[in-house]
């Protein structure tokens, strides 16, 4: 089953959200509008809005209420990408020039800040104290994840615990919050929205680990950025951590820096792929997915649960 087929019954509502996203990133300041639309039109799977909508279906589904939460979560994700690209000095995002590459770092930072502010403004339409506390805590954690990524760049002595905490903050918690806030917008019982949070967390961890694997096993065309780009930017991911358990490989990997040549990077990438680092990373991703499926089995049976299951399976089967 193709990814979008899993939730095709949401197409009309997702089209509405896409239109609302365009309005949301617009500003009376032309440059902000242009930068925001540039990022939005680069595309994306809109996984967070999908999780918001599906989670709301465990309660009373009202698209007019739920769409605000979906838009806010996607805008937060977009803002974090803009800031990420500044931190990583990235030139490409989804195969297109990043905002910092097309304009500069200052424009990128203010665009990210503007998007964060817009997301909070949109969420004010949801009159639920718990929802605002969850969102605020999530943004704090995402920000801490960004700081950790800066601190940990080219630190070849970091351990697995540091990596897992970083991807929890940078990726998993926002997906978990998408599930929980969507459920809250749908008025589901606390016992259900807490389980949806856990499901989102486990799927989010698997999703990021899979992305980190694909950074080595995919192609530049599929990634929309250079293969091995994370390592070249100093981001130490799970495959790298496992590969560095071999002393010879660690010596080779730890020589990577921002000016490492393509030929040198190709040699490092090939060595990582030839090791058992990829297969071990896949096992960790699968472990998180299994935890997600277990939580999902405890939720009421409905069309949304089936769709969430299909999406999780898709995440686990992305091409390595």
Image (tube, rainbow, N blue to C red):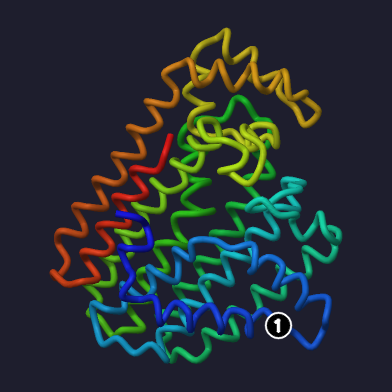
Estimate the x, y position of residue 219 in percent, counting from the top left. 57, 35
Residue ID at (63%, 19%): 253
In the image, 227 versus 174, the foreground residue is 227
In the drawing, does residue 106 fall left or right of residue 251?
A: right
Counting from the top left corner in percent of width and height, residue 246 is at 50, 12
Q: Which image quarter holds the N terminus?
A: bottom left
Up-down relation of residue 35 to residue 298 (above or below): below
Q: Which residue is at 56% across, 66% downward?
A: 139
Front residue of this view, candidates 58 and 274: 274
Left or right: 61 as drawn, with respect to 278: left
Question: In the displayed structure, does residue 10 sit left or right of residue 102?
Answer: left
Q: Which residue is painted at 45% across and 89% down in the image?
A: 126
Numbered-mark total: 1
Quarter of the image where one finds residue 154: top right
Crowding around mark 1 (Cα neighbors within 10 Å: few <14, some 14 to 19, many 20+) is some
| Quadrant in which the C terminus appears | top left
Query: Vertical placement of 285 versus 16: above or below?
Result: above
- Which of these two is toward me, 204 or 64? 64
Q: Is residue 217 above or below residue 6?
A: above
Rendering quarter of residue 286: top left
- Where is residue 44 drawn, in percent x and y? 54, 61
Does residue 18 appear left or right of residue 6 in this picture? right
Check disc 1 and report its element: helix, strand or loop: loop
Q: Which of 7 and 126 is in front in this view?
A: 7
Residue occupying the point 55% across, 15% down: 271
Residue 207 versus residue 228 in the image, above or below: below
Look at mark 1 in the image and give the residue it sits on. Answer: 26
Q: Where is residue 162 in the image (x, y as percent from the top left)?
A: 51, 38
């Amino acid at each position: 089953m193709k990814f979008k087929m899993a939730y095709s019954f949401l197409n009309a509502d997702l089209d509405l959200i896409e239109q609302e996203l365009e309005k949301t990133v617009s500003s009376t300041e032309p440059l902000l509008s242009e930068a925001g639309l540039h990022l939005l039109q680069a595309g994306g799977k809109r996984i967070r809005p999908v999780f918001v909508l599906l989670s709301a279906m465990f309660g009373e589904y009202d698209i007019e209420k739920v769409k605000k939460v979906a838009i806010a979560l996607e805008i937060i994700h977009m803002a974090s990408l803009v800031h990420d690209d500044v931190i990583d000095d990235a030139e490409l995002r989804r195969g297109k020039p990043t905002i910092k590459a097309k304009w500069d770092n200052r424009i990128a930072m203010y665009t990210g800040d503007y998007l964060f502010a817009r997301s909070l403004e949109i969420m004010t339409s949801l009159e639920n104290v718990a929802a605002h506390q969850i969102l605020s805590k999530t943004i704090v954690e995402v920000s801490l994840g960004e700081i950790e990524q800066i601190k940990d760049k080219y630190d070849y002595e970091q351990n697995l615990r540091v990596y897992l905490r970083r991807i929890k903050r940078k990726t998993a918690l926002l997906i978990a919050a998408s599930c929980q806030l969507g459920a809250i917008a749908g008025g589901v019982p606390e016992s259900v929205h807490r389980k949806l949070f856990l499901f989102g967390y486990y799927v989010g961890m698997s999703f990021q680990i899979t992305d980190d694997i694909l950074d080595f096993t995919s192609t530049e065309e599929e990634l929309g950025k250079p293969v091995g780009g994370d390592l070249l930017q100093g981001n130490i991911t799970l495959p790298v951590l496992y590969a560095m358990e071999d002393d010879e490989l660690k010596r080779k990997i730890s020589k990577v820096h921002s000016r490492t040549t393509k030929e040198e990077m190709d040699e490092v990438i090939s060595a990582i792929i030839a090791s058992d680092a990829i297969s071990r990373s896949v096992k960790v991703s699968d472990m998180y997915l299994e935890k997600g499926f277990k939580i999902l089995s405890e939720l009421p049976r409905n069309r949304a649960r089936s769709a969430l299951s299909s999406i999780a399976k898709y995440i686990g089967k992305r091409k390595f």
